Image (tube, rainbow, N blue to C red):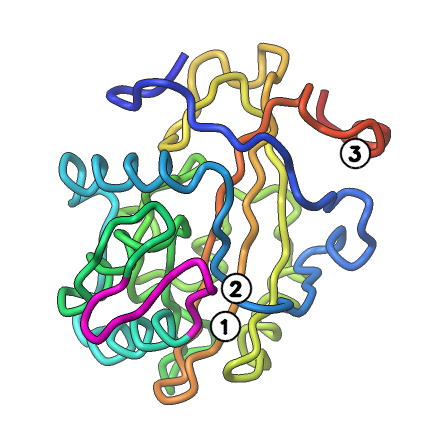
Amino acid sequence: MTGPGQGRPILQATLPYTPWDDPALSRMPGMRPVKGAWPVVDDAYAAQMAERARLMREYRAAIWAEVPGAEEALAELLATVLAGLPQAFCRDGDSVTCPDGRVVSVSGHPFEVINQMLQEDVMLLDRPSTATEHVLIAGLLCFPAYWTLAEKIGRPLTRIHEPVPGYDGDVALRVQRLFDRVPAGRAMWRANILPHTEAILHRPRPTARHGTTTARYIRSERQTVLRLPQTGAVMFAVHTYLVPINCLTPAQRRNCPIG
């Protein structure tokens, strides 16, 4: 089964990491340095990009939000993305040729351009001078897992994570410390996993059957944190994997908490 309008399932054939077996990733917010470019291009690229384009056409107001004053950080975000594209992309002046052959103009709104190039959802957080926490100032969210931008935009980290199990005072302090200290220009990543009964990428709300049916898929978010050097805003990017459980390797399945 797929979500409204999604059509056929959009799946990756493999999960390229095993967060439940990596001590560095198992303790929230356990992070590792990104090796190479942080944007990921995988076997679901063309299908995910087509779905992102459809969601932008049909649900723009639900997948895009920004607060007044976010323009400078958004412009720096686009410049950072363009400077860090992996070799699968080809930049030629004001256009970029994507891995699936599409040519994208880089002269539009940063979120419009990024949504045409990257599989990642991208959020921007900044810490006002009088605040104790980072606040979500802009977001591009095509593939949510049980949340919406309308609920989170303009809110601080603790309010954003209110429904997350285990996000207590100690974890909240560690996450805020990470956002305060992540160095400019050095991307860090972590990953989570969720059980899914259906192959649906755009899932702002759980289905009625969520939690009552045996999971068939693992949904994993590869989450990247990167500070922008000029504005100091922090990018939080999410690359979504949706992989059939039976596609995990024997080593991955051995200790997998799902399935």
Indicate whether 69 appears above or below 102: below
Nearest to N terminus: mark 2 or mark 3: 2
Q: Position of residue 213 (x, y in %)?
A: 58, 10
Camera-side mark, 2 or 1:
2
The residue lying at 38 percent from left, 58 percent from top is 122
Nearer to me, 259 or 158:
259
Residue 47, x across and y down, in percent: 36, 34
Badge 3 is on which residue? 252
Residue at label 1?
226
How many neighbours does mark 2 have within 10 angstroms: few (below 14), some (14-19), or many (20 or more)?
many
Name the foreground residue: 220 vs 48: 48
Identity of the amino acid at label 2? Answer: Trp
Under circle 2, the secondary element is loop
Magenta region, residue range = 84-96
How far apart are labels 2 and 1 at the CA level? 9 Å
Describe residue 166's horizontal placement relative to residue 132 as left or right.
right
Q: Quadrant of residue 234?
A: bottom left
The numbered mark at residue 38 is: 2
